[in-house]
Image (tube, rainbow, N blue to C red):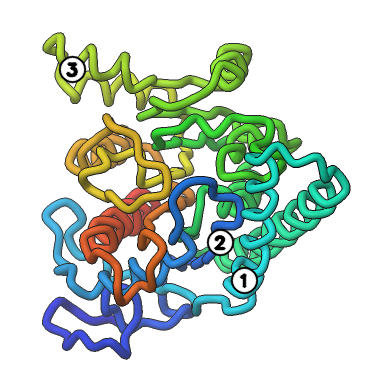
Amino acid sequence: MSFDATTTISSEFGIFGIPMSEAESRVILLPVPWEVTTSYGSGASFGPALIRQASEQIDLFDLELGKAYEQGYHMLPHPKEIKDLNDKMKLKAQELIGLITEQSQDETKMIKLRAEVNQASENLNEWVYSQSKRIIEQNKLLGLVGGDHSSPYGAIRAVCEKHPNEVAILHIDAHSDTRKAYHGFNHSHASIMYNVMMAPWKPQKLVQIGIRDFCEEEYEFIKSRSDIKTFFDMDVQRRLMGGEPWARITQDIIKELPDKVYISFDIDGLDPAYCPQTGTPVSGGYSPDQIYYLFNELARAGKKIVGFDLNEVSTGGVQPQEANEWNGNVGARILFKLCGWSVITNKA
């Protein structure tokens, strides 16, 4: 099935209003409504729904991407069982965080809560892995839509196993996410890149950009690894203020990447003006146009996007229909670019 930009857009259609099934589509989007270990803002579990809601406002033709959308983008149904588990386990995680904050001496209770949350996160990872592997084995392009940034661990595993020691993670984020654990949660949103780089199936390399909020432990971990290259935001901003063009900086980033790239995009890598409800906003960061330029240059350099995730688009804790539409709008536009460049860079 094919269609063009004159096709009537209806809410009964799928993501971006594209009326194509999973079987017909080149890009399959896996929604993961998960935010169990978030420690500041809330509402990331509604991110997939918020993006889906805003997506139909996007014009499909794009000067950079042309008609890549004709290959089909399809978002799978939102998994109610995952959202229900999220809602249940987030209460337990918040209870534990409260006990830690209050310096509780009830070790038995804290150990029990921590174990329950860690087991739920393990279960989520296995679910994401199995779903991602199923998509990849169909020769489809995988995109995961979170959720907090712990959500894509299983997707990254599936992609790395498909391309052993061939793929780098291009990690766009305000945070390094290389803590060994946070609040004792082994699969915290603050730990995903530590977990990825410690896994037996780890990628060839981790290249981070936008990083501007991290602890000393994370900094030491980054510096201890030859397979991690971090472009700290402070250094990038100094180069820009000193007169260097963004074009030159993007070339430095691209030089660090092999031919196959998985993009892991936390929306707080952007300047928070563009997505203010994200769970852990940090001043600084990039504009969408700078990120779009980077995507374009990746394609021009012959890099192949073999998978991606987009996380931390949030409602600020309210239901999607009550949320600030701006967050979903920006998230949907970033997602559209990720889908399009995935298609373009994987042409036969």
> In this figure, which residue is indicated by the disc labeled 2?
34
Seen in the image, is 11 located left or right of residue 219?
A: left
Name the amino acid type tagged 2.
Trp
> In this figure, which residue is indicated by the disc labeled 1?
82
Residue 219 screen position, x and y as percent = 54, 17
Q: Residues within 10 Å of mark 3 (few under 14, many from 20)?
A: some
Residue 345 numbered tag:
none
Residue 20 screen position, x and y as percent = 36, 82
User: Residue at the location (79% across, 47% down)?
Assistant: 110
- Residue sitting nearer the eye, 346 or 323: 323
Q: CA distance from mark 1 to mark 3?
A: 42 Å
Q: Residues within 10 Å of mark 2 (few under 14, many from 20)?
A: many
Mark 2 or mark 1, earlier in chain? 2
Disc 3 secondary structure class: helix
Mark 3 or mark 2, earlier in chain? 2
* Discs 3, 2 touching: Cβ within 8 Å: no
Residue 168 screen position, x and y as percent = 52, 34
Residue 73 visible to an observer of this rendering:
no
Seen in the image, is 157 located left or right of residue 148?
A: right
> In this figure, which residue is indicated by the disc labeled 3?
240
**Residue furthest right as drawn:** 108
Name the amino acid type tagged 3.
Leu
